[in-house]
Amino acid sequence: MNAAVYPPKLFVRTVPLRGGADSLVRRLPAGTPLAWLTGDGGLVGWGEAARWDGAPEPEGTEPTDTTRFTEAARWLTGLLERTEVEDEVGLPGTGAAAFGTFTFAPASSGSAMIVPRVLLGRRGDRAWLTTVTDEPGVHPGELLYPAPAPRPVGPLSWSTGARTAAEWGGVVAETVARIRAGELDKAVLARDVTALAESPIDVRTLLERLHHRYPQCFTFSVAGMVGATPELLLRREGRELSSLVLAGTRPRGASAQDDERLAEELMSSAKDVEEHGLAVDSLRDALAPLAEELVVPSWPHLLRLANVQHLATRAHALLRPGVSALDAVAALHPTAAVGGTPTAAAMRLIAEEEGMDRGGYAGPVGWVDGAGNAEWGIALRSAHVDGARARLFAGCGIVAGSEPASEVAETESKFRPVREALTD
Ligand SMILES: C=C(O[C@H]1C=CC=C(C(=O)O)[C@@H]1O)C(=O)O
């Protein structure tokens, strides 16, 4: 059924939670949790009051096609028009809110938007509960039963994805040759590995471990996509937009001295500064037509995570009136941190060379509320979890100066967050 045609009428109520909500994950029932967790708060949800599933575009559709975003935006607008909201809190994420995941490429399946039946949120010392019903005045009073504790994952068997590490190194070498021949400037190539557990994986276990180990990241779970991404495609509050662009990577060092040496090497590497610059340029070019003001620092800073360190640039914009969060998501995806430069040539090369369907990996993932506030990350350091199976993804920006062996090593560092979250 195409839910986009007949969104249901919904009744939404948000109330403050006086006792706070210390661990959002610990409130989640098992099943298919919805989550967006940041250092100091976030949103978790469960149940489905309304859902949109994007139909994949036909094979051969232009890789930069944005139909899935416009369809989702149309569905959301229709839904919000038919929604009655009582909001006693009035913060970003209160009132009507939907979680979403979009595929990297238009011809993949997996784009979805979900309005949960129950949503629990926290921002600083404010916490709230939102309930969504099909009839007015029947909001259940007590929904915060203690949930059963998350289950360990148990033993896993690992297998190669579309390509072995060695084969993928060959693809990197081929891509470097195409870049040096002048076909394009940059392409972000990814590979996958699969883990199979003996019983369905409890996503809450992954969320808890990822959030604990990567508090600066955005830990998410939406329609099977689970991970902890450091890359913020956009945050929209009112008309203010911010974005954190990442590209250029080194591992963390074994000692403080080693760490410092790797950081200095990264900050002064012409190859990484070029790779980063292309990602920043793609964001600036996509955002400029949507913005009245745009501030992009001219030099990146260093972002240190538990597994890797990155070159990072935080951009700020004041959006033109009428530009919605999903308009901005559609315009910004894919930045050259996950696609390449020029975008269309890089998307074609990715489709030809990678030998796999990325699904939601490297696509936008996040949430949007009825007032238009939103946070969307890029689904990196992530896996698609389906029952007992998790398919993990990791990719690297390839430019003329890239070396296959170091790119293979970099993918291993980028698999680590989910690999370790799966390990009891
Ligand atoms: C494509 C990924 O990372 C991107 C984001 C940060 C740094 C990157 C890099 O240095 O290659 C990538 O552009 C990934 O984690 O799968």
Image (tube, rainbow, N blue to C red):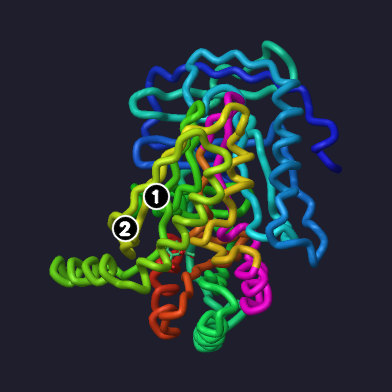
Q: Position of residue 108 (x, y in %)?
A: 72, 61
Place residue 299 in its image quadrant. Answer: bottom left
Q: Badges 2 and 1: C-beta atoms under 8 Å apart?
A: yes
Task: Tell me which residue sits at (37%, 52%) in the image.
Answer: 313
Question: How far apart are labels 2 and 1 at the CA level?
Answer: 8 Å
SS at mark 1? loop
Magenta includes 371?
yes
Which residue is located at x 59 percent, y 82 percent?
Answer: 163
Residue toward you, 163 or 336:
336
Mark 1 residue type: Cys
Report if residue 151 lies within the magenta region: no
Residue denoted by label 1: 217
Q: Which element carries disc 2, helix, strand or loop?
A: loop
Query: In the rendered image, which quarter contains the N terminus?
Result: top right
Q: Closer to the camera, 338 or 271?
A: 271
Magenta segment, which residues?
Answer: 345-374
The numbered mark at residue 305 is 2
Does 277 appear above or below 167? Answer: above
* Badge 1: residue crowd in 10 Å (few <14, some 14–19, many ≥20): many
Most foreground residue, 157 or 227: 227
Which quarter of the rendering shows the C terminus? bottom left
